[in-house]
Amino acid sequence: MASGIDPTYDMIYSNEGTEWHRSAIHTPVITRQTIEKILWPIIESPTYMNVDGNMIEIENHKSIAADMRTCRDDLNEGERILPLHTPKAGYRVITNSEVWDMMEETIKDLGGTITSVGTLERGKKFFISVSIGDSDMIINKDQYKFFLNFVTSHDGSINLFLYDSAMRIVCMNTLKWSMSDRNIGDIQLKISHKKNATLAIQNLPVVVNSILSNRTKLKEVMEYLNECRVDRNEAIAMTAGYFADDKEQKISTQAYNSINDIVNLFENGIACYGETLYDLANAATEFWTTGRGTGNKNATDAQRVYRSAMGSSADNKTDFISMLNDENRRNSSIMVGREAYKKYLMDSKK
């Protein structure tokens, strides 16, 4: 199902009551005691297969499962051990309780409010969204509310991530969207399920402070971009300059199509009016978040989200807006882009 919520095993706790799926358990305050039913331990075991009546151990692998025997008396006895994953032996389990503990330790002196917590896809995903610091912002008349999101999986699909987003997680769709909607130029922490996970977790306070500082920086950058007027021709040249080959200062057919996509979004995209660098920044963000910039047109939603959040698309979003924010880079891109775009059109007519 689109929500990713299995009503037998998954529980969503919320203090806002705005969830479209109407499956959340609403509570004024979310505490450890509130969510104890999803803070189950994870058990690990060697992996065996029955082959021709013989039990054979699968080398270098193990099985992990959620142990709900002490927290889910509403389930039948046979349902309380829930298989999650069959990873390699070096996989380091990070439990929901550990994520909760690191979240509490991280925000204890910052006055954060936990707004939603839950599991998804039969316990395979776990998330926490926290409103913290200067969460409510108005940037160029657009209203934003930022959330510090802790996200992990127990099936090997994603690492443990800590990042800032204007998206509160309440289902699988919002989890995906939040990962692709991270702040431009954001600071994040990614912790792999490996033996050095504990050392990485120790960096959490530093990362959170950087994230909160980045919110202020983001606001300043976007307000500056909104003051810079730009027309369609300048938007084309600037974007073409970004895509132009560094040595030959040419653009490929793929780049030409990407330039046109971004400029069309500049005029017709979400919250875009074709007037300022802010509109061009929003266009580029949309292009590398949900458009062709996340991959080929046949890519699945999951592939697009991954590329947008963790791959080259994320780097492009950051670098493109950095270019817009730097007057020297911007002017250089316009000069290179005008010639490259003009040359492409002339060559295509031959």
Image: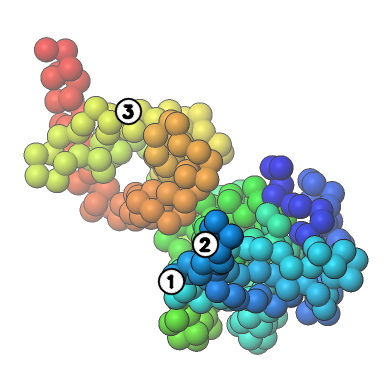
Check the picture and name the quadrant holding the N terminus: top right
Compared to 127, does 33 lie above or below? below
- Crowding around mark 1 (Cα neighbors within 10 Å: few <14, some 14 to 19, many 20+) is few
For the residues bearing labels 3 and 1, Cβ distance under 8 angstroms: no
* Left or right, 325 with reference to 302: left
Specify the farthest residue to the right: 74
Residue underneath mark 1: 60
Residues under labels 2 and 1: Cα distance? 16 Å
- Crowding around mark 2 (Cα neighbors within 10 Å: few <14, some 14 to 19, many 20+) is some
Compared to 350, does 307 lie above or below? below
- Judging from the image, what secondary structure is the residue with disc 3 in? helix
Residue underneath mark 3: 257
What amino acid is found at the position of numbered circle 2 in the picture? Answer: Gly
Q: Nearer the viewer, mark 3 or mark 2?
A: 2
- Judging from the image, what secondary structure is the residue with disc 2 in? loop
What amino acid is found at the position of numbered circle 3 in the picture? Answer: Asn
> Could you say which disc has been placed on residue 41 in the image?
none
Name the residue: 27% across, 48% down: 330
* Residue placed most toward the observer, 103 or 147: 103
